[in-house]
Image: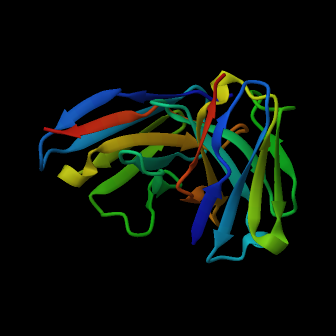
Amino acid sequence: EIVLTQSPTTMAASPGEKVTLTCLASSSVNYMYWYQQKSSASPKLLIYYTSSLASGVPDRFSGSGSGTSYSLTISSMEAEDAAIYYCLQLTSTPPTFGSGTKLEIK
Amino acid sequence: VQLVESGGGLVQPGKSLKLSCSASGFTFSSYGMHWIRQAPGKGLDWVAYISSSSGTVYADAVKGRFTISRDNAKNTLYLQLNSLKSEDTAIYYCARRGGRGVMDAWGQGASVTVSS
């Protein structure tokens, strides 16, 4: 099973600040996917195929990476971006999620 | 696209429960479907997948205890949970496998608590 390690575990950012979240895979994966989960809501797809923005997602979100190292970047933090972010790999079965990064607003 | 889970509740260890996920707004029979769970205060944990042709895959932690199935005539996905353990306590989400191969739509979740 591919293990995804996200960092940092928790962080806080000021409005307007650039934020970068990291996801490292224990083995090479073809693509990375990113989800946002607020409070008790269900997860929302943000990024698919490593760098493609899901429908309705603001363009301040972007994804990049390859092989075993991937990142999610928010170009300018907004209060509504406070949430937990999860990465997901679908290259091998079982699909696995990272343990999440909790992003708070300062 | 709408997915609505039901059937959750409080159940004793060793007992069974059946979750349902009612789908609408898309051609249910054409899509693979997942169950994913989230233990209290924890991250996301994939449970099972059923393809549009009803092929199934399970996480090792639930293999032999849980069964995923679907009824395309009723636009409904199911998860039969048997021999429940305390560690199965979680919110259970159904999710659609979208055209890009990723879970692109999720239900609101059904809460399962396993406790005596």
Left or right of B65 on screen, residue B34: left
Q: Is residue B56 above or below residue B83?
A: below
Give coordinates of residue A64: x percent, y percent. 41, 47
Regarding residue B37, the answer to whether it shows in the image is yes
Q: From the viewer's side, name the closer residue of A22 and B60.
A: B60
Left or right of B67 on screen, residue B96: left
Give coordinates of residue A21: x percent, y percent. 34, 37
Instruction: Report the residue at 66% width, 29% height from top.
Output: B88
Give coordinates of residue B74: x percent, y percent. 79, 71
Q: Is residue B76 above or below residue B69?
A: below
Instruction: Report the residue at 37% width, 40% height from top.
Output: A84
Instruction: Report the residue at 79% width, 36% height from top.
Output: B16
Q: Quadrant of the C terminus of chain A?
A: top left
Q: Quadrant of the N terminus of chain A?
A: top right
Left or right of B42 on screen, residue B34: right
Q: From the viewer's side, name the closer residue of A20 and A13.
A: A13
User: Can you tell which quarter of the image residue B78 is in?
Assistant: bottom right
Q: Residue furthest front?
A: B116
Left or right of B109 on screen, residue B34: right
Q: From the viewer's side, name the closer residue of A31 and A5.
A: A5
Instruction: Report the residue at 58% width, 35% height from top.
Output: B90
